């Protein structure tokens, strides 16, 4: 029985990886930079993403967002307050997003209309690690309220991070969040990965983080210059 379950899981993952590969090609052809945001529930993904999209739009970029939750479209409505298109993916029982959910929720959108597609994953430090969504960059977030040890407890996810963001830094003092220890723990799992420190509530670090995001755009492609074919 165990062997059959493992085989089934391998097949499903293989299918997901193939679709993610196809999606990645579509995103790249359209000139749309895609970022998969992963963290535990309540880290501040939605709040930070909303503030980031407001800032990017003010600079002339065209962001859009897909956001996953088991139930409710609360986060899509919060993200839409930025003025950017936002769609909710409700997974009901599933604890992570998969490439086919992303593909289905792109229906009716023209990817070349977006400079950035942000995908807010289901709040979970375990399952999303294994699922490629066709993203260019995986962002793993850790809030000052969660404790410094999460990278050590959930190494698989932190190992897949292209970039790490510490959130809710306005609460670092009251929560006695030890930044240096948290950084050391991240780097123990993912040496040299860049770590950004933000407070979506106070605005700290947002300008620098947005500036970094704009460097992820393909060279020579200013805001609003996606390929019209995709
Ligand atoms: N103090 C503070 N609270 C924040 C910050 N970012 C988010 N929050 C709050 O943390 C809670 C969870 O945020 P949310 O964006 O929904 O987290 P998500 O589940 O990761 O998407 C909400 O009550 C937010 O208002 C922040 O930078 N500082
Ligand atoms: Mg959220």
Image: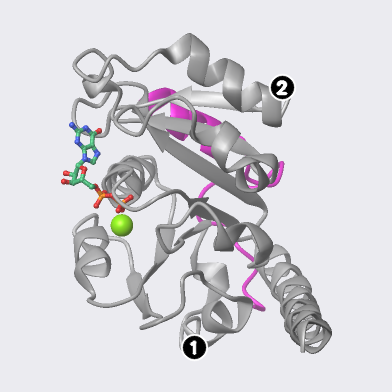
The relative height of residue 4 versus residue 156 in the rendered view (above or below) is below
Name the spot of residue 85 as percent of width and height, x first: 33, 68
| Quadrant of res 43 | top left
Secondary structure at badge 1 equals: loop
Please tell me whether residue 140 belongs to the stretch shown in magenta: no
Q: Earlier in the sequence, mark 2 or mark 1?
A: 1
Seen from the viewer's position, the closer of residues 189 and 4 is: 4
User: In the image, 124: left or right of 71?
Assistant: right
Q: Residue at x 69, y 41 (%)?
A: 159
Q: Quadrant of ligand 1?
A: top left
Picture quadrant where residue 36 is located: bottom right
- Residue at screen point 50% across, 20% down: 182
User: Element type at marker 2?
Assistant: loop
Q: Name the residue at 25% across, 27% down.
A: 203
Mark 2 Cβ inside 8 Å of ligand 1: no
Q: Which residue is mark 1?
A: 107
* Distance (Cα) linking label 2 and label 1: 37 Å
Q: Which mark is residue 30?
A: none
x, y percent for residue 150 = 49, 35
Location of the N terminus by quadrant is bottom right
Residue furthest toward the front? 1
The x, y position of residue 149, in whole percent, is 49, 28
Q: Which mark is residue 192?
A: 2
Q: Is 166 situated above or below 52? A: above
Within 10 Å of disc 2 (Cα), the crowding (few <14, some 14-19, many 20+) is: few
Indicate how the structure is coloured in the image: one colour
Q: Judge by depth and name the residue closer to the eye, 53 or 90.
A: 90
Q: Which residues are magenta?
A: 207-230
Q: Is residue 106 left or right of residue 200?
A: right
Q: Determine whether label 2 and label 1 are within 8 Å by CB.
A: no
Q: Identify the residue at horizontal 80%, vertical 85% (top origin).
A: 11
Locate residue 200 relative to residue 64 in the image: left or right. Answer: left
């Amino acid at each position: 029985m165990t062997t059959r379950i493992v085989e089934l899981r391998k097949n499903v993952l293989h299918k997901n990886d193939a679709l993610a590969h196809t999606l990645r090609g579509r995103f790249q052809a359209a000139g749309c930079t895609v970022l998969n945001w992963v963290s535990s529930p309540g880290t501040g993904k939605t709040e930070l993403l909303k503030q980031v999209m407001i800032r990017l739009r003010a600079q002339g970029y065209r962001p859009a967002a897909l956001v996953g939750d088991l139930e409710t479209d609360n986060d899509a409505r919060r993200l839409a307050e930025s003025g950017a298109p936002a769609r909710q993916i409700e997974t009901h029982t599933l604890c992570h997003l998969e490439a086919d959910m992303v593909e289905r929720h792109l229906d009716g959108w023209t990817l070349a209309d977006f400079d950035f597609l942000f995908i807010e994953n289901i709040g979970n430090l375990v399952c999303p690690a294994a699922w490629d969504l066709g993203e260019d960059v995986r962002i793993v977030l850790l809030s000052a309220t969660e404790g410094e040890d999460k990278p050590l407890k959930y190494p698989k996810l932190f190992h897949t991070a292209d970039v790490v963001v510490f959130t809710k830094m306005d609460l670092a003092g009251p929560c006695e969040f030890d930044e240096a220890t948290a950084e050391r723990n991240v780097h123990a799992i993912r040496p040299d990965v860049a770590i950004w420190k933000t407070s979506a509530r106070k605005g700290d670090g947002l300008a620098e983080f947005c500036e970094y995001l704009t460097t992820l755009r393909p060279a020579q492609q200013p805001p609003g210059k996606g390929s019209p074919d995709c």
